[in-house]
Amino acid sequence: MPARVSEAIVLRTYPLQEADLIVSFLSRDQGKLRGVAKRARRPKNPFGAGLERLSHVRLAYYQRETRELVNLDSCELIRSQFGLLGNYPAGVALDYFAEVAEQLLPPAEVNEKFFRLLLAVLDSLRDPGSPDPDRIWRAVTYYSLWAVRLAGLLPDFGVCAGCGAVLDDPGHAERAWFGRGVPGLFCSHCRGGAGTAYMRELSAASRSIAAEMLHKPVAQLSPAAWEQETAADLRRFLVEQMEAHVERKLVTASLMEQSTAGL
């Protein structure tokens, strides 16, 4: 069977036997796949540094209908994330991007929008005009919002999930509340009956940031200064939506919030 060649982003790798790797990757034209890279752990191998986390590559592989794993043949590196690895918070952000993609994306389902989202936020982390915390938190928040939206999990920010009241009425903007395991946002009146003992507020400022992110590429967002506290409630809401969907905690989400504490 002839090899298929796909543009791809490597999500993570797992050791297999003594010299091989299992590689999880997101291809532009085939979606998320897993494959075996034989001899990839040996000093001389046909993959070089192309199988590092979140490397943008061109993969050649053989795919058989009767097998779950494809056979990786070779790898051409398009762009490495090596320059970001010396920055610990940026490195944790890479781990977060990979974990979210691994957990949210179903196998073998084409999702070019998610592929382009990953490339966009990776590019934004290299923005030389922004300090580290600015570009890291902007990229993480943008990625989280769009990952939830592309997974079909993003509720309408402007409407109460309980009574349907408009939350963003220009004449009288309602406060919005959310709780773990409860989909959607709730107005002050409905928060008590939303089925959770404790709810947090999603601020009007964070809802405004989300509205801008949903209408602009990450590279065109307003050049306002970002700190860890900026849209922290929005990130928490988005992470809780993802965790409820995949029914497990995202390990890197809490690490991400700790990573820039000293910056």
Image (cartoon, grey):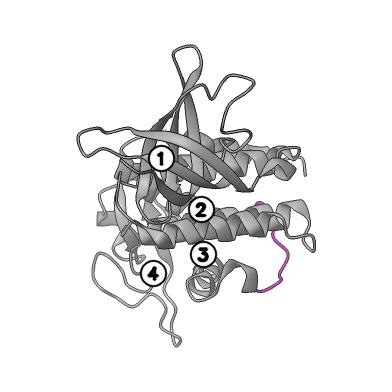
* Residue farthest bottom in this picture: 171
The magenta stretch is 222-229
Q: Quadrant of residue 154?
A: bottom left
Quarter of the figure with the N terminus: top left
N-term mark: 1 or 4: 1
For the residues labelled 2 and 4, say whether their Cβ atoms are less than 8 Å apart.
no
Q: Which mark is residue 235?
A: 2
Which residue position is annotated with label 3?
203
Q: Main secondary structure of the magenta part?
A: loop
Residue 79 visible in rendering: yes
* Residue farthest top in this picture: 18
Q: Which mark is residue 157?
A: 4
In this rendering, the label closer to the viewer, 1 or 4: 1
Q: Is residue 223 magenta?
A: yes
Q: What is the total number of numbered labels drawn onto the structure image?
A: 4
Label 4 sits on a secondary structure element that is loop
Query: What residue is at 56 percent from the left and 35 percent from the top?
Result: 51
Q: Is residue 181 magenta?
A: no
Query: What residue is at 32 percent from the left and 41 percent from the top?
Result: 246
N-term mark: 2 or 1: 1
Task: Count residues near mark 3 (Cα–Cα under 10 Å), then give few for <14, some for 14-19, many for 20+.
Answer: some
Q: Which mark is residue 61?
A: 1
- Judged left or right of residue 164, residue 217 is right
Task: Count residues near mark 4 (Cα–Cα under 10 Å), then give few for <14, some for 14-19, many for 20+.
Answer: some
